[in-house]
Amino acid sequence: MLSHVRKHAFQLGRGPLSPGSRAGVGAAVGLLALVSAVESADGRAVHYVALMAVAPILAAGFASWRAVAGVGFLALLVGAGFAVADPAMKLTTAVSLVGIAFATVVAASVAAVRQGQVERIGELSRLASVAQQAVLRPLGPQVGTLAVAARYISPTATAEIGGDLYEAIDTPYGVRMIIGDVRGKGLDAVRLASIVLGSYRHVAYERPDLRAVVADLDRAVARNVGDEDFVTAAVVEERGGTLTIVNCGHPAPLLLRRGAVIPLEPPAPAPPLGFMPVVRPRVERLEPGDRLLLFTDGLGEARRDGEFFPTADRAWRLLGHGTVGDGLASLETALVEWVHGRLDDDIALVLMEYTGPRSGATVAVPSWEVGATES
């Protein structure tokens, strides 16, 4: 009888049960089996049938309303079987059967409401993910003289939306990249990230000086945020083998060169976008094979048992091999293992490798580079 009704309950669904539904239905059926065994061992008189009303309530926490209804039908059928076998059927037994039916209706209603909420949340999550993917376009594999790869790591499989941003563009002034982190989460953070990226994709082609790019981005942020909102950002330019970085309150990029890892701290600290930062560029000459890691503060804050992930110590071993995409994959794997799969914040990662100057190309060097003879 139990196997027949379990099959019937499954057929009431719209397809195979999810793992959560299977667990809920399995627990409910197990409860029914336990109550049935106790009732059978107690003799022909009915004493425990009322406990079967718990089965559909138990299933309602995990399964769909159809599966809950199937479990309730099974409980009612089994309870009725014990009631018929009782030679002196009591009023309390009949009340118990009515109670099982009532519990099934209530549990199925609760499951229907819960299922609808889960579906709406899932749809919103999918829409948010699509919105974020529209904002964060795929990077690489080659942008100008740079091999580029990017990854976005969410703290959970269902939380795919945040305010981390990145972009890489080949402009008349060289390859320009930005990485940033919007204060806050959710759709408001994605909205502000889209504003910053939209402004950057315009001004990166128009402004020869990175400081002017930062000033334009600051005004765009200030027009669209509250008093306590801001965006940390690092803007990077590779022009003629010269790397220039302006940093607005963002974690310093890491330069990987011949086995060494060099944090590229700014000459002077500057506040985030939205607080009128006055930046001083950091300039480095690049060598073919140099790699640069840009990341958001989720990487710096990843920890287990109070110990932070040793990014600088392990950067070369993780990022210095294979392609830039291989390097980021290794970093993500090591990071997830370090925190045992429990991240507290979104993480954006961009890894670039300087492949050398373009053959036959003449690129103007930055006007602020020491010893520059061209502009």
Image (tube, rainbow, N blue to C red):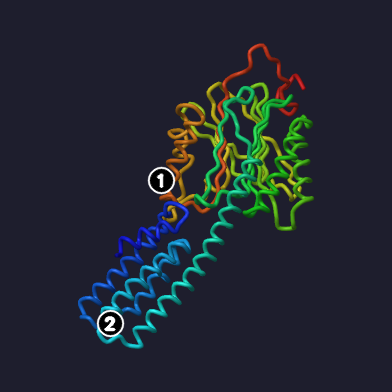
| Placement of the C terminus among the 4 image quadrants | top right
Please give the residue where the numbered disc 1 appears in the rendered image.
337
Q: Secondary structure at mark 1?
A: helix
Tell me which label, 2 or 1, sits earlier in the chain: 2
Toward the viewer: 366 or 200? 200
Disc 2 crowd rating (10 Å Cα; few below 14, some 14-19, many 20+) is many
Query: What amino acid type is highlighted by mark number 1?
Result: Glu
User: On screen, 53 above or below 87?
Assistant: above
| Placement of the N terminus among the 4 image quadrants | bottom left
The residue most toward the top is 360
Residue drawn 76% across and 30% down? 205
Viewer-side label of 2, 1: 2
* Residue 330 rendering spot, x and y as whole percentages: 44, 36
Side of 329 where 374 appears, left or right: right
* Residue 153 rendering spot, x and y as whole percentages: 53, 44
Please give the residue where the numbered disc 2 appears in the rendered image.
46
Distance (Cα) linking label 2 and label 1: 54 Å
Side of 94 where 281 appears, left or right: right
Query: What amino acid type is highlighted by mark number 2?
Result: Val
Residue drawn 45% across and 28% down? 321
Q: Secondary structure at mark 2?
A: loop
